[in-house]
Image (cartoon, grey):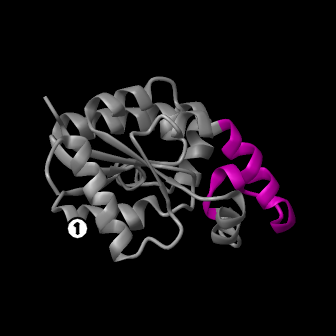
Amino acid sequence: MVHRRVFVVGYMGVGKSSSGSRLASLMGLPFLDTDAELRERHNASIPDMFDQLGEAGFREQEQRVLQQLIESHEVALISTGGGLACHPGNMAFMRSQGTVVYLKMTPAQLAKRLRGKTDERPLIAGIVPEELEGFISQHLEQREKHYAQAHITVDAENLDSERMNSIRNLIEGNWGVSP
């Protein structure tokens, strides 16, 4: 059976939530966001959950939310947290449950987008602006092997309407549906 689910993965700050929401609207799919679900369920911010649970505990909660969203939504676009695809088993699970789209940007593009937001992002908290791109480059290199398993990889810079339509067509082609 072909699942009508789309999972959007990629590094923090790449635009998974904003682009995912636009793509879901374009495709007529419900939009779900694992980070938003976590914040709502725990009544806490992502940095607070990292502090309370540690990274390992946070990743377990994130994985649980992913499984519950999949169980309760046969049709949906699910935007994931930046590290969710890198937790053991998650990428293979998402690939078996729908189409995975990797939004990709260079470390320089990501650093530009994340500058001034380090307090909102636990993994880059305390990193000074001059070191941000270097950190992202190293961290992204570790995560790339997971993200690269996506069915579709998209350059996420300048996702205008035409590019979003192209992504929709790629996804629907992966489903075996004529665009």
Task: Left or right? Give the position of 36 relative to 59.
Answer: left
Q: Residue at x 62, y 38 (%)?
A: 143
Tag 1: amino acid: Leu
Q: Residue 166 in the image: x percent, y percent?
A: 32, 63
Q: Nearer the viewer, residue 174 or 5?
A: 174
* Residue placed furthest toward the front: 178
Q: Residue at x 21, y 50 (%)?
A: 172
Any part of residue 89 in sight? yes
The overriding secondary structure of the stretch rendered in magenta is helix
Q: Residue 3 in the image: x percent, y percent?
A: 18, 37
Q: Nearer the viewer, residue 55 or 110?
A: 110
Q: Residue 135 in the image: x percent, y percent?
A: 78, 51
Q: Nearer the viewer, residue 103 or 38?
A: 103
Q: Is residue 121 magenta?
A: yes
In the picture, which quadrant includes the C terminus? Answer: bottom left
Q: Which residue is mark 1?
A: 26
Q: Residue 86 in the image: x percent, y percent?
A: 54, 34
In the picture, which quadrant includes the N terminus? Answer: top left
The part of the chain drawn in magenta is 120-142
Q: Residues within 10 Å of mark 1 (few under 14, many from 20)?
A: few
The answer to which image quadrant residue 18 occupies is bottom left
